[in-house]
Image (cartoon, rainbow, N blue to C red):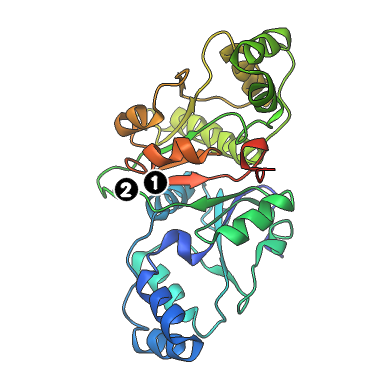
Amino acid sequence: MPYELDNRLVIGVASSAVFDLQASDAVFKSQGEAAYRKFQEAHLDDPLPKGIAFPFIRRLLSLNDLSADANDPLVEVVLLSRNDPDTGLRVMKTIEHYGLGMTRAIFMQGRSPYEYIPALNIALFLSANKPDVDAAIRAGHAAGQVLASQFDDDDEDRTLRIAFDFDGVLAGDESESVMQAEGLREFHAHEVKNVMQPHNPGPLKEFMVRMARIQAAEEQHKVLHPDYENRLRVSIVTARNAPSHERAMNTLKSWGVMANDAFFLGGIDKGRVLAVLKPHIFFDDQPGHLKSASAVAPSVHVPFGIINQPAT
């Protein structure tokens, strides 16, 4: 029987998202590919340090214990690498060292693997390589660039906290376009006028929908195990405020998803809230918001929509 991916949450990750490759990259950039190969071979049994997305990936994979069948996991994480299989061997050994449940990988020497996102039913691709992420977004795929960020991986904390901006991340950028062209007053008027009209989906809508399936699995698990405490917590952290908040909530409801928390900040610095919320990953389309966010939480830039169009 083939291994089906259709009913799973599938994440594609570059090794640069999950592990700290600074030492390896420095060798490649300063000495070239041959020296890089020798460096990786010499350090084959030295595990790579944890990277920005490591706490997120580790906790996400831990949710597979909600499945009654270990051979039928809820979550699949696939390594998508620009390395060739030989130089990628150290990454695979590092995955084994940390006990991450990742067994599937694609290695493409010097080429971006983003073209395989649809074939693998991937709902989110994470990489520290900006050109790869930009290309994936242009191709219509869900992708984010993992930024240099402050992060903490507390082994005692089993909760997975995911935080999303709304416009340009979960929703499309139609309303953001109004904001940029006509200002805040017209933006609010537009949202009030269209309050019952769901937003068009943004790049991470499908990712959140699949996360909602895991939330549902937690609720089913709780029926059989009343002492179980939910580990997945989803938050919206947006610059929207009243009266534009209502359309955002109506949109999520129309998609059949639910946020545990919603912060309608109306221009308040998101970093202030994220420092208290402590998400294991935060997604935003605006580099300005991510500057303060990355100082307190693992942050991902989703280069989608009008905010990320080149200046003309």
- Give above or below for 200 relative to 85: above
On the image, numbered disc 2 is attached to which residue?
150
Q: Residue at x 56, y 58 (%)?
A: 130
Q: Position of residue 169 (x, y in %)?
A: 60, 36
Q: Position of residue 11 (x, y in %)?
A: 57, 53
User: Mark 2 and 1 residues: CB-CB less than 8 Å, in contact?
Assistant: yes
On the image, numbered disc 1 is attached to which residue?
298
Does the image show residue 195?
no
Name the amino acid, label 1: Pro
Q: Position of residue 270 (x, y in %)?
A: 40, 29
Query: Toward the viewer: 177 or 231?
Result: 177
Image quadrant containing the N terminus: bottom right
Q: Residue furthest front?
A: 312
Query: Toward the viewer: 226 or 212?
Result: 212
Q: Quadrant of residue 178?
A: top right
Q: Residues within 10 Å of mark 1 (few under 14, many from 20)?
A: many
Q: Residue at x 31, y 33 (%)?
A: 275
Question: Which numbered disc, 2 or 1, marks the residue that appears first in the sequence?
Answer: 2
Q: Residues within 10 Å of mark 2 (few under 14, many from 20)?
A: few
Q: Position of residue 114 (x, y in %)?
A: 66, 62
As measured in the structure, the alpha-carbon distance from the residue carrying label 2 to the one carrying label 1 is 6 Å
Q: Which mark is residue 288?
A: none
In screen coordinates, is 96 left or right of 195? left
Q: Residue at x 67, y 19 (%)?
A: 182
Image quadrant containing the C terminus: top right
